[in-house]
Image (cartoon, grey):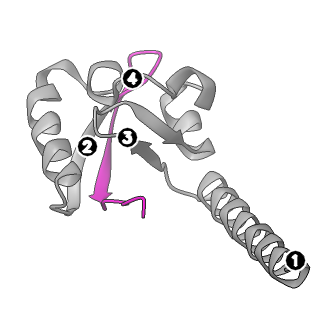
Amino acid sequence: SSDLITQISEMTKEQQRIADDLSRLIDSANAPIFGVDMQGMVTEWNRKAATLVGYTKEEAIGKNLVQAFIQPEHRQSVSNILMKALSGVETANYELPLLSKHHQRYTVLLNSTTRRNK
């Protein structure tokens, strides 16, 4: 049974290493990457998103993406796109109208994919 425990421990370490690698990849990507949960709250915010929009990861996590970071006149259409994405309908090249901390307007191309926790 100690062999089994060793195997499980090694598998757990490998899974953690892969998760850490993916996290580093997302954070260092040269494109803004963010994630939202089923309620539209920000759960992921990489360095490029922070640089572009002016909010640190710590400031962005837990905020409602649409209410906090989308230009007011586009909030309804962005909400609709997010609801589709969260229900599994992927979106390609949607022009996402972001609003920065300093009220600058940016448009980025959004490609949404649904990540399902297994």
Of badges 1 and 2, the one in the foreground is 1
Amino acid on which disc 1 is placed = Thr
At x 36%, y 40%, the residue is 37
User: Looking at the image, is 32 positioned above or below residue 56?
Assistant: below
Q: Gap between marks 3 and 2, in whole Å?
A: 14 Å
At x 58%, y 45%, the residue is 46
Element assignment for label 2: strand
> Is disc 3 in contact with disc 4, using a CB cutoff of under 8 Å?
no
Q: Gap between marks 1 and 4, in whole Å?
A: 53 Å
At label 3, counting other C-alpha atoms closer than 10 Å, the crowd grade (few under 14, some 14-19, many 20 or more) is many
At x 31%, y 62%, the residue is 113
Q: Residue 37 colored magenta? A: no
Range of magenta residues = 99-118
> From the image, which quarter does the C terminus lie in?
bottom left
Between discs 1 and 2, the one toward the N terminus: 1
Residue where numbered disc 1 is placed:
6
Name the mark on residue 36: 3
Q: Nearer the viewer, residue 19 or 66?
A: 19
Q: Gap between marks 3 and 1, in whole Å?
A: 36 Å
